[in-house]
Amino acid sequence: MTYSPSPFRIAAPTPYYPGNGLFLLRASAAVGWEFNGWKRESLSWKRSCYIHGGLSGPGSQIRYEGPDAEKFLASICVNNFSKFKVGAAKHAIMCTEDGLVAAHGVLQRMAPDAFRLFASGPWAAYQHSKTKLDVTQTIEDRYLFQVAGPKSLDVLEAATGESLRDIGFLRYRDATIAGKTVQVMRIGMAGTLAYELHGPTAEGPEIYDAVFRAGEPFGIERLGWQTYTVNHIEGGFPQANWTFLGAAHEDQGFLEFVNKGYVRWMPPDFTGSVDPANHRARYRTPTEVGWEASVRFDHDFLGREALEREAADPKRTVVTLEWNKEDVIDVYASLFEEGEEYQYFEMPTSPHFRRTVAHADRVLLSGREVGIASGTAYSYHFRKMLSLCTIDRDRAVIGNEVVAEWGNHGGRIKPIRARVARFPYLSEGRNQEVHLPIEHISAGPVG
């Protein structure tokens, strides 16, 4: 298959293969929506691997440099920086003064006074606009390709022609693909072995195509945005503006900053059985999504006081819910009955992540609310309807039965029985636990 110049007026960082693919115009980029069917795509990170380019584009990577770069980032991130070495990366979590997650992304330390922040939205840029610290900010135009699944290393070693087994989890270094320098980082959202590739957007189509061709003997799939979000549910990666609403939306100064020219900020869709007026049910603290281990009270940061209060008496944590299949089937059956049907389950995720999602479903036990479910996704691999759920800590016991109220507030509500299950749900072959023998270099398909 030969790729062609993009037919879109806005540049696409990924190649365009004529006659194959659906696309979504999202923010300032054309994003692949579906390529080879969502079922095949959703199996890729368990059986082979995928390549995904939906996080690429202007503004997805921001570079911070200067004498106060670390001080600035530490002031807006809950994370510890004292042991953050050059060549390493971490999950950077940023909160509002109320301790609610405003944004999060991956942060690399490139030099003692230089950092790069990935896929976290404009919250950090907004904070930079207010700082008096000596730190420069550069909005970079770079691609971000994710290659994930058990065959991902074989594919990348075939594409680079070298061993990449020295790259540890949350580490990165340069390699060469198609004669171009590419940064390779071991990280991903699939839960399985996974990597990211970074470089200038202008080189993106050629790099993507080279990796895709190298991966064809291994069964690589091009992953579309529609199915990418199933990653987050199976793999146990809560995601701002998908499984919960980033609390940046509460900051009027942030909204004014964004709409001045960073990118047009679309208002979220408030859906689900929780009253749309209840914004707090759609926000999360780091503890409520299982990120409390990243919160370090060894420095001053935005939201510290609120998080210290929560740490003294945490109320909720995160689990996976398995939704009862008979109740789910009954939702579809209502399409064939007279009267108002139940809220439709889109496949493979509901609602789809076409724009900012602010979905929240009530979760009950004996008629009392004990949690909030969101990020509902059908796993074709596990053949189950799953969701994430922020739930009272004393109810977060595997096997506990609860009821999720499915439907939009004010409409017809379907009570769906659900079972508390493991989190993360995809628990085998986790990226950080995979040991890679250093001497092996892949030369072709395995198995």
Image: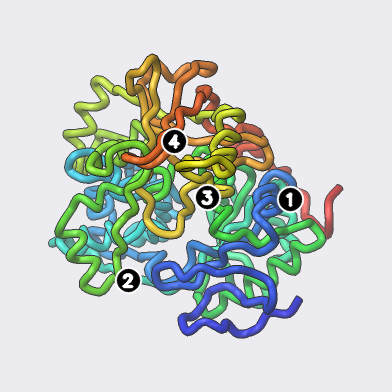
Q: Distance between the residues labelled 3 and 2?
A: 28 Å
* Circle 4 or circle 2, nearest the eye: 4
Q: Name the residue under label 1.
A: 48
Sooner in the amino-acid sequence: mark 1 or mark 3? 1
Comparing 87 with 267, the one in front is 267
As helix, strand or loop, the secondary structure at mark 3 comes to: helix
* Circle 3 or circle 2, nearest the eye: 3
**Residues packed near mark 3 inside 10 Å, few (<14), some (14 to 19) or many (20 plus):** many
Which residue is at a point 46% across and 71% down the rendered structure image? 25
Which dot marks residue 229? 3
* Circle 3 or circle 4, nearest the eye: 4
The amino acid pointed to by label 3 is Thr
Which residue is at a point 37% across and 59% down the rendered structure image? 115
Q: List x then y, in percent, for residue 91.
A: 41, 46
Which dot marks residue 406? 4
Q: Distance between the residues labelled 4 and 2?
A: 43 Å
Name the residue furthest front: 338
Say which quarter of the image contains residue 226: bottom right
Which dot marks residue 265? none
Comparing 223 with 431, the one in front is 223
Sooner in the amino-acid sequence: mark 3 or mark 2? 2
Q: Mark 2 points at which residue?
A: 138
Sooner in the amino-acid sequence: mark 3 or mark 4? 3
Sooner in the amino-acid sequence: mark 4 or mark 2? 2
Q: Distance between the residues labelled 3 and 4?
A: 19 Å
111 in relation to 362, above or below: below
Label 3–label 4 contact, CB within 8 A: no
Name the residue furthest right: 447
Q: In this view, does 33 lie to the left or right of 410?
A: right
**Residues packed near mark 4 inside 10 Å, few (<14), some (14 to 19) or many (20 plus):** many
As helix, strand or loop, the secondary structure at mark 2 comes to: strand
Label 3–label 2 contact, CB within 8 A: no
